[in-house]
Amino acid sequence: MRHPIDIVAMFAALWLLASMVLDALTPKELTAVMIGIAIGPAIVVTAVFYYLRCPRTDFAVLFAALWLISDIAIGFISPMPLPHFLIVLGFMPALLVGIVLHWQRVQRRHQRLVVSSVKRG
């Protein structure tokens, strides 16, 4: 069972870790505190949906969207332009989730075609 205290501790640790890693990757004018404030709302929303046991696919889409929004927020608050690899890093979860969802759709379609051809005989 997911205890709320465990979820708070887990997501607080992830929030701190993400802030520190992004602080190391971004220009020195962008501090860990600024990054923490920018990604904080996304971490809270993600934690709430994790607590509510959101379905895995929906959770992945939600996470990808919130990660992209956080990346955009960091870009807005940054006094210096962000490196290009950070912009690409913001799109990666959304791209990966889109690829997986498309692959699952193709697989389901292929399975339906195989089953219908077997039934026809």
Image: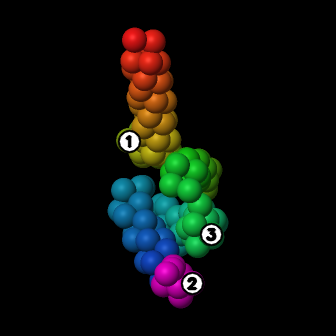
- Say which of marks 1 and 2 sits in front: 2
Asked if residue 46 lies in the magenta stretch, the reply is: no
Q: Nearer the viewer, residue 8 or 18?
A: 8
Q: Is residue 85 left or right of residue 5?
A: left
At 56% from the left and 56% from the top, the residue drawn is 55
- Mark positioned earlier in the residue sequence (3 or 1): 3
According to the picture, the residue beneath numbered tag 3 turns out to be: 52
Number of other residues with Cα within 10 Å of mark 1, as a class: few under 14, some 14 to 19, many 20 or more:
few
Element assignment for label 2: helix
What residue did someone put label 2 on?
4
Q: Position of residue 115 (x, y in %)?
A: 43, 23
Q: What kind of secondary structure does the magenta stretch mostly adopt?
A: helix
Q: The residue under label 3 is which amino acid type?
A: Leu
Question: Which residue is painted at 40% across and 71% down in the image?
Answer: 17
Residue 74 shows up from this direction? no
Residue 3 lies within the magenta run: yes
